[in-house]
Amino acid sequence: MIKAILQPDFDLKDEVSDFKKKRIREEACNLFYELGYESTTLDAIAKRLKVTKPFLYKHYDNKGELLFDICRTGIALSLDAVSAACSQPRPSTERLQCLAESVLEVIFEHQKFIVVYTREEKNLRPAEAREIREQRKLFDHQLADLLREGDQTGEFQVSDPLLTANTIGGVVTWVSLWYSPDGKRSKLEILTHVLEMIFTIVASKKAFRPLDGSVGQLGNIPSVRSISPVGGKQDEC
């Protein structure tokens, strides 16, 4: 009975601790994005959060550990999107479109995490960098398996699935480095353009339906997800 009564307290403590770490991680990511990792101090992070440095040390041993947590978050968001898209019981063409849309959604919604992960990975300690690279390999290999399957079914023409996966990953990730919510290109325009590039790279014999519903040169299969040009909620793939 005593354990049953006390257990919720322990759960609440964990939730509070997780929330504090989340807030520290978010503000650290904002500063790493704005100033760069090397130019950001723990004092600056504490000041942004209106807390003391000892408060930070209760959750992170040092700035490097914070960077590692941010990088893990960035790659995990992308990897989850890829895994979800690749596991669907759909033709390779539709899964590839869903994958691209899902990863771009991550970039649009969590741009700073992706940029910091991409730009500051070089500042990770060797063991941490290896772990992040292994996670990145999972991303590339899952995409490569999808491309290989599409090639075998005749939907794609891909001579080197892994190299092609690396290329597609680069195309998609690069969006995070220049995308601006206030820029002249809408999410819809960016997504459509990236899909055109990807389907050209894989020499798809099928094509995605233009996401604005217009008739284009890319064929007529239904879109598996649509993004509102004004940033509305996305439909499920």
Image (cartoon, grey):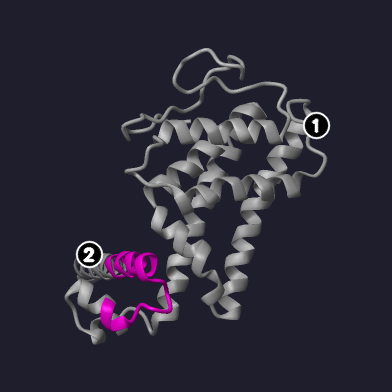
Q: Position of residue 7 (x, y in %)?
A: 25, 67
Q: Which mark is residue 91?
A: none
Query: Which residue sits furthest left?
Result: 50
In the drawing, does residue 152 fall left or right of residue 52? right
Query: Which residue sits furthest right?
Result: 159
> Considering only vertical position in the picture, is 122 above or below 171?
below
Picture residue at 49% right of the left edge, 40% below the top: 102
> Considering only vertical position in the picture, is 134 above or below 53?
above
How packed mark 2 is, by other alpha carbons closer than 10 Å (few <14, some 14-19, many 20 or more), is few
Given residues 3 and 77, the one toward you in this image is 77
Residue identifier under label 1: 152
> Can residue 73 be spotted in the picture?
no
Query: Which residue sits furthest front?
Result: 184
Q: Position of residue 108 (x, y in %)?
A: 40, 45
Which of the image's four quarters has the N terminus?
A: bottom left
Q: Position of residue 237 (x, y in %)?
A: 48, 30
Q: Position of residue 179 (x, y in %)?
A: 43, 47
Q: Secondary structure at mark 2?
A: helix
Picture residue at 80% right of the left edge, 31% below the top: 152
In the drawing, does residue 13 fall left or right of residue 197? left
| First to last magenta residue range | 22-44
Q: Secondary structure at mark 1?
A: helix
Residue identifier under label 2: 8
Q: Main secondary structure of the magenta part?
A: helix
- Amino acid type of the residue that numbered disc 2 sits on in the rendered structure: Pro
Q: Label 1 to label 2, Cα distance in Å? A: 52 Å
Q: Quadrant of residue 134?
A: bottom right
Q: Earlier in the sequence, mark 1 or mark 2?
A: 2
